Image (cartoon, helix red, strand yellow):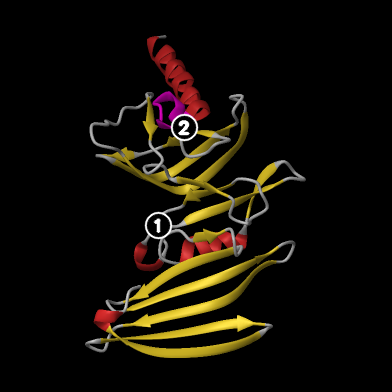
């Protein structure tokens, strides 16, 4: 009789574990409040260690009325704690903008706020990489952009935006002495068009060779100039 009761209790416990999974033990939770003018976020990550997290996680986005608007997942959310912060399961830990694995901005220059979510270190020289979601006004939801995710994942860290010229600017490097800048024009309803490539090569002692390839009227031109190292500023 006792053995049957123990077996019954075991299977009840096992069923609860299967149903609830990690909720039985709690996840690490973080809150981001100052990264966006329109949204706050709650981040859940399964595993953290020391002063950083690098694991699968979810991001819950809330509007200014504290209504949840969308949930996202990332296979590798990466974030670092600030000085004096301590990991504790079940406790909501606040993150400053510079700690957050989220980047908000108008990446496609349509007047609405978009979102980039850290997806590991897949960028140039193992730099930060991001999945990029643009806000779709028709669906009233964030939709993942393949083009912008490629730019956010394959270059050196996250890209910059130039809202005046409506361009996205990416960076890269090769070894100690070669740096690359690439600019893409954002064309509404069409996508991205690469319009500039710039290479700065300081491998020759005392000099910097700059090669600029630029697209104008669907034609590419190339300009090359060599500067003394002490007279060149990147």
Task: Reply above or below: 219 against 54.
Answer: below
Q: Which residue is mark 2?
A: 33
Where in the figure is residue 211, as x and y percent of width and height? Answer: 44, 86
Question: Mark 2 to mark 1: distance in Å?
Answer: 21 Å
Is label 1 in a helix, a strand or a loop?
loop
Q: Is residue 175 left or right of residue 213?
A: left
Residue in the picture at 72% in, 41% down: 140
Q: Which residues are magenta?
A: 21-31
Q: Is residue 140 left or right of residue 216?
A: right
Question: Furthest residue to the front?
Answer: 231
Q: Residues within 10 Å of mark 2 (few under 14, many from 20)?
A: some
Task: Reply above or below: 21 against 54.
Answer: above
Q: Is residue 3 left or right of residue 73?
A: left
Tell me the quarter of the picture where residue 123 sits. bottom left
Camera-side residue: 49 or 60? 60
Task: Reply above or below: 59 against 163.
Answer: above
Residue 202, numbered label: none
Q: Is residue 187 left or right of residue 159?
A: right
Task: Reply above or below: 94 against 145.
Answer: above
Q: Are marks 2 and 1 in contact (CB under 8 Å)?
A: no
Q: Earlier in the sequence, mark 2 or mark 1?
A: 2
Tell me the quarter of the picture where residue 88 sits. top left
Quadrant where the C terminus lies? Answer: bottom left
Tell me the quarter of the picture where residue 202 sits. bottom left
Residue in the picture at 72% in, 66% down: 190
Camera-side residue: 39 or 74? 39
Q: Which residue is mark 1?
A: 128
């Amino acid at each position: 009789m006792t053995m049957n009761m123990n077996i019954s209790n075991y299977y009840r416990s096992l069923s609860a574990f299967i149903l609830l999974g990690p909720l039985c033990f709690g996840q690490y939770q973080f809150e981001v409040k100052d990264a966006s003018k329109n949204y706050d976020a709650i981040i859940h990550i399964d595993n953290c260690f020391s002063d950083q997290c690098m694991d699968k996680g979810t991001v819950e986005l809330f509007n200014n009325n504290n209504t949840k608007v969308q949930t996202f997942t990332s296979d590798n959310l990466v974030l670092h704690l600030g000085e004096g912060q301590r990991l504790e399961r079940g406790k909501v830990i606040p993150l400053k903008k510079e700690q957050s694995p989220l980047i908000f901005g108008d990446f496609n220059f349509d007047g609405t706020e978009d979102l980039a979510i850290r997806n590991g270190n897949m960028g140039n020289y193992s730099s930060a990489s991001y999945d990029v979601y643009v806000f779709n006004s028709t669906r009233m939801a964030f939709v993942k952009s393949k083009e912008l995710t490629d730019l956010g994942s394959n270059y050196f860290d996250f890209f910059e935006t130039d809202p005046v010229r409506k361009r996205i600017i990416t960076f890269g490097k090769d070894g100690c002495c070669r740096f690359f800048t690439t600019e893409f024009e954002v064309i509404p309803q069409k996508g991205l068009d690469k319009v500039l490539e710039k290479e700065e090569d300081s491998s020759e002692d005392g000099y910097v060779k700059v090669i600029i390839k630029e697209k104008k009227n669907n034609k590419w031109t190339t300009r090359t100039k060599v500067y003394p190292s002490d007279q060149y500023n990147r």
